[in-house]
């Protein structure tokens, strides 16, 4: 009997169960974060409703590596607060920012003290009247949790690392792939680096190297699918394998916001001063050395040239990226210039013309009319340009309703209207189209279409694998790929490639003091 009890106890302990005494020894770790990419070159604004928020225990559903039965879940006592994520868009209203941060701070106060905090952000949030929102956010978090708490930050590689953000975080990492197929892997790395430091008693790293690199490039030129981005990021693993280095990261930065923090950055953390400094300078110089080699990840052309190439091709589907209004980069998503130009073309006037799927344009009033007439009915109205009408007015649409879908999490209601040989997806609310199911659930077969035109930049993996061929169209909008047309006023200059003949910058290590040394 006694042996059975001991055996049962061993099994329970093996599965992560522990006595109250053991549980008290586990580190206490909070979770918080806000993530959005927001363009300051778009007239759109993002309010609190734009964020999908998870609060308390709901947060765990976002992180498979923190499932109830996972190893990492059992390594700490977790205190999730608020984690909000929004589709990229316009600048965040101050009211939305203050509200979401305020809720987070109040929840953090409820369970003090903390040994660690997982700070899960994107890094490219812009807020009305506030420079460096993530730096402001983490400073406010520090005011609540104190300087002893170890903060580990996870970011998108298109985020911005200001000196203030670098000061208040202890560990920091970012994605190493664009498209971001390693997003969850990177977040898990941030969590496990923190757990390892707490469990080992090593705590905060002795050294944090921060090197701003005066390069500002769009993601469509810095994809890790191709060189030089692929080779540049491939240099990171050898640096983190060095004794005395915890992690190393390269941020491309966010090109569509006009703020002093918008530029590339390299950061390395660790306990060996020489190793940390050498790795940071090696990565920063490696980035600078290949600055002239970055090209668009796919052929780029005007819209007219793109359509001519697509119409001449026998490869299906021919994908055209409508880049200037890409909602997943921060565009308003309702610029009508491209669809207006498409519908003017004689090739698409006949129902028997080349099949083109356009995804998408928001038009709540048009959607309402389409729902009223139903599938098979004729609908007429306008859509788009409610937010960004700088390049074209609302587009007039008249055609046959082919499909209606209600209940989509992002769009709420989607309708497909056929105008000539063009299938236009019109939504109640803006929505990015990244998956094959986004089309097939609307009765469309993108693989059989001659042309699929999507408001996107570089193709996400599922669309990339589906393409017969692909071109990125240089179209106007809040995330225009022609950076020189944007009219920066506040970024630090000189900045490559805006200042192509700038002298070589000083890329020597700047050591950032530990957070508990800040006054």
Image (spheres, rainbow, N blue to C red):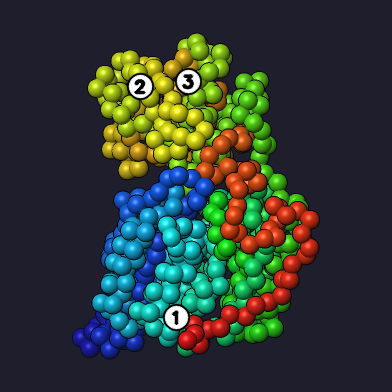
Q: Is residue 294 above or below residue 270?
A: above
| Residue 512 appears anywhere in the view | yes
Q: Residue placed at 39% from the left, 83% from the top?
A: 146
Q: Residues within 10 Å of mark 3 (few under 14, many from 20)?
A: many
Sequence-first disc among 1 and 2: 1
Q: Provide the residue designation for mark 2.
A: 381
Sequence-first disc among 2 and 3: 2
Q: Residue placed at 63% from the left, 25% from the top?
A: 304
Q: Provide the residue designation for mark 3.
A: 422
Pinpoint residue 284: horizontal percent, then vertical percent. 70, 67
Dot 2 and dot 3 residues touching (CB under 8 Å): no
Pinpoint residue 316: horizontal percent, then vertical percent. 58, 26
- The CA distance from mark 1 to mark 2 is 56 Å
- The CA distance from mark 2 to mark 3 is 16 Å
Tell which tag, 2 or 3, sits nearer the viewer. 2
Quarter holding residue 177: bottom right
Quarter of the figure with the N terminus: bottom left
Q: Residues within 10 Å of mark 1 (few under 14, many from 20)?
A: many
Which residue is nearer to you in this view: 487 or 440?
Answer: 487
Sequence-first disc among 1 and 3: 1
Quarter holding residue 257: bottom right
Tell which tag, 1 or 2, sits nearer the viewer. 2
Q: Provide the residue designation for mark 1.
A: 150
């Amino acid at each position: 009997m006694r042996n059975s009890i001991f055996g049962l106890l061993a099994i329970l302990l093996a599965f992560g169960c522990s006595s109250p005494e053991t549980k008290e020894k586990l580190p206490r770790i909070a979770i918080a974060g806000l993530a959005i990419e927001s363009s300051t070159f778009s007239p759109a604004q993002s309010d609190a409703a734009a964020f999908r928020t998870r609060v308390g225990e709901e947060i765990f559903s976002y992180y498979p590596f923190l499932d109830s039965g996972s190893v990492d879940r059992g390594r700490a006592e977790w205190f999730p607060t608020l984690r909000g994520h929004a589709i990229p868009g316009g600048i965040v209203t101050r009211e939305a920012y203050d509200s979401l941060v305020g809720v987070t701070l109040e929840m953090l106060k409820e369970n003090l003290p903390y040994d660690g905090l997982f700070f899960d952000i994107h890094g490219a949030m812009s807020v009305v009247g506030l420079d460096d929102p993530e730096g402001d956010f983490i400073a406010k978090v520090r005011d609540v949790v104190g300087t002893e708490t170890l903060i580990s930050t996870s970011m998108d590689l298109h985020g911005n690392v200001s000196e203030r953000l670098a000061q208040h975080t202890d560990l920091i990492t970012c994605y190493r792939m664009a498209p971001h197929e390693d997003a969850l892997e990177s977040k898990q790395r941030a969590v496990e680096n923190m757990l390892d430091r707490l469990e080992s008693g090593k705590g905060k790293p002795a050294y944090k190297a921060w090197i701003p690199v005066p390069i500002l490039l769009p993601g469509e030129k810095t994809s890790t699918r191709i060189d030089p981005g692929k080779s540049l990021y491939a240099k990171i693993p050898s640096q983190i394998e060095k004794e005395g280095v915890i992690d190393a990261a390269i941020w491309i930065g966010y090109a569509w916001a006009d703020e002093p923090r918008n530029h590339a950055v390299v950061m390395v953390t660790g306990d060996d001063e020489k190793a940390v400094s050498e790795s940071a300078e090696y990565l920063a110089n490696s980035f600078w050395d290949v600055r002239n080699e970055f090209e668009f990840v796919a052929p780029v052309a005007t819209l007219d040239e793109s359509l001519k190439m697509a119409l001449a091709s026998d490869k299906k589907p021919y994908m055209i990226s409508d880049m200037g209004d890409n909602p997943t980069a921060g565009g308003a998503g309702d610029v009508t210039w491209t669809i207006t130009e498409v519908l003017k073309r004689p090739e698409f006037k006949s129902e028997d013309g080349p099949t083109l799927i356009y995804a998408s344009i928001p038009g709540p009033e048009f959607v309402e009319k389409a729902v009223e007439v139903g599938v098979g009915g004729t609908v007429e109205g306008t859509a788009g340009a409610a937010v960004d009408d700088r390049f074209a007015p609302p587009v007039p649409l008249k055609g046959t309703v082919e499909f209606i879908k209600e209940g989509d999490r992002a769009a709420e209601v989607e309708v497909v209207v056929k105008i000539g040989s063009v299938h236009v997806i019109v939504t109640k609310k803006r929505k990015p189209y990244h998956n094959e199911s986004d089309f097939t659930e609307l009765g469309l077969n993108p693989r059989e279409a001659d042309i699929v035109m999507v408001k996107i930049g570089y193709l996400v993996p599922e669309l990339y694998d589906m393409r017969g061929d692909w071109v990125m169209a240089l179209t106007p909008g809040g995330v225009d790929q022609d950076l020189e047309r944007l009219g920066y006023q506040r970024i630090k200059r000189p900045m490559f490639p805006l200042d192509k003949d700038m002298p070589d910058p000083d890329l020597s290590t700047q050591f950032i003091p530990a957070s508990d040394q800040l006054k």
